[in-house]
Amino acid sequence: MKRIKIFSISLLVVIALCISGCSKFLDETPLSFTSAKTFYKTEAEAQSALNACYIKLNNIYDGVNGGLICATEYTSDLAYLNAGSVDQTFAISAGNPGFGANIWSNAYNAIMTCNATIAGIQNSTTIPEAKKPALIGEAATLRAMYYYILTSMFGDVPFYTRDASASFDVLVQVAQLGRMPAAATRDSLIADLQKWAPGLSQAKSSAISNNRVGAAVAYMLIGKMALWNKEWDVCIGAMQKLKGIYGDLSQYPLTDTWFRNKNKPESIFEIQFSGILKTSTTATQLEPPRATGTAVYDGVTVTELGSTATVYTAVTPTNYFMSLYDTTDPRRNTNLAYTYNGTWFTRPASNNHTGKPWPGPKFWCPNMSLAQDNNNQKVFRYADALLMLAEAANETGDQATAMDAINQVKARAKASFVLVNYPGHDAFLTELKKERARELFGEHGRKWDLVRWGDFYNAVSATSAIEIPIIGTNLRPYHEYYPIPQAEIDRSNGVLKNDAYNQ
Amino acid sequence: MRLTALFLFCFCLQVSARVNSQEVSYKVKNGTLENVLNEFKKQTGYLFIYNDKDMQKSVPVTVELKKIRIADALREVFSKQPLDYIIKGRTVVVEAQLDAGKAIAFPINATADVALPVDTIRGTVTDSLGNPLARATVAVAGTQKAVQTDATGEFSISAKGSDVLVFSSIGYEEKRMNANSVPSRVKLSTRIEKLEEVQVEVGYGRVRKQDITGAVSTVKMQDLQNIPVTRVDQMLAGRIAGAEFMSVDGAPGSGTTVRIRGTRSISASNEPLYVVDGVIDGINNLNDLNPSDIAGISVLKDASSTAIYGSRGANGVIIITTKMGKDLGGKTNFNLKTSLGFAEQPSYLPLMGATEYAQMLNDNFYLTSAANATQPLENYPFPDPLSLGKGSDWQRAITRRAPFANVSFTASGGSKTTRYFFSGSYDNDQGVILNSSMRRFLFRLNLDQTLSKYAKAGVRLSYSNTKQEQPMRYLGAYNNWSVSPTMVAPIVPIYNEDGSLNSWNSQNYSGGVSDLPLFDATLRKNTTNTGTNNAMIYLDIQPINDLVLHSSLSYSNSGINQDVLIPATMPSRGTAGDAIAKNVNKNDNLLNENTISYKHAFHDTHHLNAMYGFTVQQQNFNAISITGSGYYDDNTALWDIGSIPNKANLGVSGSKQIQTRMSHLARVNYDYNQKYYLTATVRKDGASNFAADNKWAYFPSAAIRWNMLKEKFMKNVNLDEFAIRLSAGTSGNDAIARYQSLDRLSSTTTGYLFGGTQPVAFYPSNIANDGLKWEKTTSYNLGVDLSLFNKRLDVTLEVYKSYTSDLLLSVQLPTQTGFSSRLMNFGKTSNKGIELTVNYDVIRSRNFSWSTSLTAAHDKQMVDDIGLVGRVVTNTLSYGASYMINGYLKGYPVNAAFGFRYAGVWHNQAEIDQDKKDKKYVSSVYAPGRQRYIDQNHDGVLNADDDIYLGNADPAVYGGWQNTLRYKKLFLSVYFNYSLGGVIYFPAGNFLGNASNLTTGFEYMVNRWQPVRNPDGDLPRPTSQDNIPSDRFLYDASFLRLKAASIGYTFDLTKITGSKLKSLALSLNGSNLFLLKNYIGYDPEVNTSGTSSTLRRIDNGSYPPNRTITFTAEIKF
């Protein structure tokens, strides 16, 4: 019986010890991730949280079906891509939202990250207050960028700036948000950017180390959103700030606008890619077809493109876009490829040299390995800002500013292209719209410009829709905005709606 | 229907095989025993075995029997005979009573201290029929002294008169008798596994089978021998009513996904808990277990049995015990077994040849523009399709007949105090897909030592090392269509003219190269090496008779190393060079369990068995992964990781997780006179992976059993067992990842590029959930155990219902929150079902026996509530609109399949125009020859409203049917498993069944619509891939499979080899020999979604389960 006693006692001791240690034993202490509560101690930590705010830009600018460039450029009056996706043929619907689903989830995930980062920095007690505005401003600028994309893509969208990752209650409130008028969202963002922009680096974007965003991007966003809201003076104010930073356009060579030439002085915002670490596939749809195993592209040997590139069905310019260029316009042979080193490609040479050209060398990726495009995606640059300034000044009647701005762009292409006399408000606007096409094709904005001007349906109906029957069949005025994906409508319990699409 | 009919037929056959009466009527005065037995034989069909010598001892019989049960009749007849009898099923063995019988009870008379003279005792050991038994052991109890009988069964041993001699031989009942009363012939009777003696593992203890109160199934291990598969779970399909086993994949070493009584949970795991030798989480996966080491498998199904595992039990528990050594009086039994054979692909998908494919592309050309229709044949893409013949057969190009080899060795034995079981085995299992294989070593040592009168201890040590080679392959995986051997077009050559592999898939858009199937199969390396150590030590202390203290400590660790190499020679690696990925996982599990149990019988009628236990567990999970690319040398890249030319191409990540658990458990078993049983259990569990205030929970259960046969009013009922069981209880599910209740800031170094580098970025990836708690399942079970015809027919019927609430559900959030889902306790599911197990010894005679067992189960599982969201989509095509294929919708089955109803094609433009008014159909493209679907709400719009419930992926009935036949030493074992009802979706049909020009197509697509040749056709025209899931790709998942068959013969080598060898068994075995199915894919019994909690019967490119045939030789000595 002694044995039992000894055993029982020792067992009891073990149990007693365990139970007393219970509470601790079952505690969870994460070892391989951290928590916002303990993070944001130093500026470096805040910086690394800021890094995360950029990540989704890669997803948005290189997504399925060619990324944002498809949703904005190949579905406009300038070009089309007849490769069958719902985006390209305007077959999008809530049930089949195409690239819209990708934009929606990536942009909102990034917005949540930006909001959490801003809250984390604001709440930090150890980061010096003086350091905070630059840090917060950077996150706020990126947040505005994502909302700018969302409002341009979808029109009215849910808008919030609270930290949804902080508590479940906030999360639930955010989950129940419906569409907010886009104009109000933009006004709110413009005010926010105007608050933070002065605290950001006032240098040219190319001069800011490590490709981070500075005040230039903030001003650009203010200008873009002001144009949407027809707040001309706000746009002019922001563009004048950029003029102060960037000066005269003539100092920037036109070849810097090529996608392969990264982060040049004219650049305001580029999405960074590299051939290995972050690849995009954009160039695969912007190069002539290649013969197997060679560097022969549509009948012409293009040595710079090499023999390993993967090319898919290429983007085709509309007749309208082709007609915009003077044959001596250097941008014609940059944006479009009729010839290479003087030799005509087979397709443009067809029908007595009236065939369709290929997308031009501006978009090509030299020596691309398979589908790995090494180029940056150009989002904003100074010529765009000048044309925005011209547009806004034309609306306010400031002819001198408008003329100077548009002529800087025209003159860089060719001195003789400049407008000598102000042609009147409407004619100026018409010319400006054409100039934006000539200058900025492929830079992620044409469709949005058309929508902003109210031209989308008519412009596409008169161009792509005539050339491609399926676009003609499918195109509807409501395609100016993407529908909110059905999955989101389901998840929101019907708070989100696509009224335009349900007509 | 066909299958159902076949089953019913088979089942009827069995039932009608029941013969004759169980009762006898006979009247005789002074008749001979032999005549009486002959008469009994006539009346009942029972077989009587006896020898004439014994019969001579019989005395005349006088009886008057009127409709008396045979058992009672025998009792009466033999009551005055100097003979014994044993009933084995329908066979009665008669043998002489042992004179020594009385002497067994002697030792009380003998004074142990008195030294009696040593004597030499001689005799012969025989079987019950008088045949001499060679190599039987005769030992003096309590000493090391033992001898063996010679070939004629004779022995001589020196012993004192007071010694007790122990006579034993494998397969015979041990006999003990006093040395001075040993007869000249000692008869050993054949060991009969009586039902009463079968002990069943029920978790923290064993009970006799007829004392079980819950729903517990056991597997007959002898049915599992000789099946040529390497994992025990692969043998189990259909053998346990209510447990559904499904291969994840047919690749060597691939796992199985198991559902016991269906699916309950949505986001938490639904896989059962495995307990091996009492150790929870001790095995990394079932590859770690040698099937031939297994002594028994119990499956706990209802809450009363699983509640003792508390939070881990809701999905059922599979308890596996490994073999123990036996007291062979110091002898060792050796067993050497080797199997050699091959595996082959049982079937191929019926795909187009190059001719048919070229004709399809010509059709496409014809339809592309109106002008093409009038073009001359020379202008068509393939002017002469017939010249192309069959073209490339990619399926056969990457498959092979693959060798299979297994060697295993066991040694077991022991003495009274020490028992041991040692085993080792080696498997080399090559896959039917080129370069896929599994090689495995397993070792085990089970040692049990009696330390003293009060204490016993033991260890279980095992080590396994598995190396799996799994090059990439995408069999019918629709999202890798350009490189899948079931998808690449037959006009794409396998080899270039110079004999090198072709890397150009002409159908894959334009431009780039493709890693066509043979590149993946021959160049890519994907090696997983898993080493697992298991060690368990236990100590049992029995200070007084009724009390046992048990304590065990187990530690297991496993290292899982995955090495992936895509060499630079792979076409897709073009200029980027090779790529490697290494994943190193080190997991361990420390578990301490302590129980104290008390067992006592009061007044011989009240039996009490009470147990309390306390357990503590800690698991560590460590992971490191490394990726790199662009090394100079493919051969060293995987190991000389640091030799990377550009450090920017090196990626590392790591994690460590700890999970802890603590439990108190208690159980009381009580029975009154083995008539009324009561079991009550409660477990209190604490686990680290729930929110701080919700870590602990209680899981109670209770069950009763009523052995009705013991009631007086059942006295004249002709049954051997009749019991009713009733149970209710709650068990839980904690199978979610760790740290789910905490907010989380994750890091990445593969984020945005800043100045060409990727500095670390921190982002929120999980939001805290203070309410996260257990998922609970409450279930009720009614069971009936019935045994008839002298226990020849056993029937077990279970009916159950269970309700799961607080589902651990990843609730899908509106994406605008930045999160797509959050793990919450939300929603309810319910299951109800019925299970039937029938075991029947159809024939039991000396030379011939036939036993059969059948299981059948039905389970209906419903989503009762899904909370906020209304629907949870779990599966879509990754192309197009992503319409729901599988998902959770309130009021529908858990594994419901959804889609559109196919309504043929538009035959002409007139039909399209007419439908603009009728709104009967919708289509993604309105053109002649394109698919149309039923417009469910007649709104003229193709949208999610037309995506409707099409069927349940779960079968209506499933189970298995085992037959074992033996004629003398020849045995035949045939095992079928079946599944009736249920649907399976074939996602690759989106390409293969829609005449995509990107991929090949099913042969049946030659009947596609064509305006001239086949204007009434209802299959779509070329390039009709519309990414819409429809019932056209939904198939009946019913099947009947000849899962295993084995024929063998055992040679007795004792005489020939002078007892040096015992026996040699030769057998020819096959698995997956025949499959009757309606499904177009390889096999409906697969699930490429692995052990996903939500998805069952998904076939997105599964490796087909192969057919294996082996020849096995097993030698015992």
Image (cartoon, helix red, strand yellow):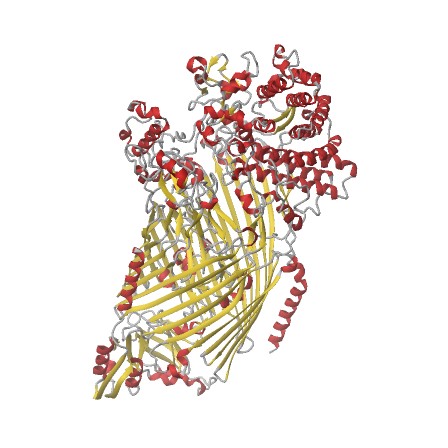
| Image position, residue A210 (x, y; %) | 67, 30
Q: How many marks?
A: 0
Tell me if residue B212 can be seen. Answer: no
Asked which quadrant contains residue A451, the reply is top right
| Image: B608 above or below A138 | below
Foreground of the two, B872 or B124:
B872
In which quadrant will I find the C terminus of chain B? bottom left
| Image position, residue B1104 (x, y; %) | 38, 47
| Image position, residue B221 (x, y; %) | 38, 63
| Image position, residue B353 (x, y; %) | 31, 35
| Image: A185 above or below A409 | below
In which quadrant will I find the N terminus of chain B? bottom left
Foreground of the two, B750 or B714:
B714
B18 sits left or right of B856 in the view: left
Asked which quadrant contains residue B644, the reply is top right
Tell me if residue B391 can be seen. Answer: yes
B1064 sits left or right of A249 in the view: left
Asked which quadrant contains residue A415, the reply is top right
B942 sits left or right of B52 in the view: right
| Residue found farthest to the top | A416
Foreground of the two, A19 or A471:
A471
